[in-house]
Amino acid sequence: MIIYENAFSELVNKLDSNKKNFSSTKWAISMIKELVEQATPKKVLNIEEFGAFDFYEMIGKCPKCHKALNKHHHHKNCGGCGQALDWSA
Ligand SMILES: [Zn+2]
């Protein structure tokens, strides 16, 4: 998360000093946008449920990096890219 903190302080410093260095300001904004997108839950792709009685599994694919996911292990975030996940149908 250090890169996002750096992006945010870069943006704040630029706004404070009011210097016209647009490329680094654009970079800082794009980093924050990426963080916001990663933290916003996205629907898991190709969800499949199987099992019976007290054992069941729910699997799917990450909407961002397409890594195979198992709800038991990746309930909130993708293990590959960190994307926040929404397992609702
Ligand atoms: Zn992913």
Image: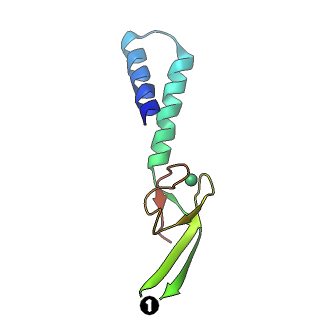
Residue at the spot 45% in from the left edge and 69% down from the top edge: 72
Residue nearest the viewer, comparing 76 with 12? 76
For the rendered model, the colour scheme is: rainbow
What x and y, as percent, mark residue 17?
39, 10
What x and y, as percent, mark residue 68?
60, 63
Q: Is residue 49 above or below residue 86?
A: below
Residue at the spot 50% in from the left edge and 77% down from the top edge: 57
What x and y, as percent, mark residue 35?
47, 40
Residue at the spot 53% in from the left edge and 19% down from the top edge: 24
What x and y, as percent, mark residue 66?
63, 57
**CA neighbours of label 1 inside 10 A, class few (<14), some (14 to 19), many (20+):** few
Give the amino acid at mark 1: Phe
Looking at the rendered structure, the secondary structure element under dot 1 is loop
Left or right: 33 with respect to 68?
left
Tell me how many marks there are: 1
Q: Is residue 3 above or below residue 54?
A: above
Q: Quadrant of the N terminus?
A: top left
Q: Residue furthest bottom?
A: 53
Q: Residue furthest left?
A: 16
Residue at mark 1: 53
Left or right: 81 with respect to 11?
right
Mark 1 vs ligand 1: CB below 8 Å: no
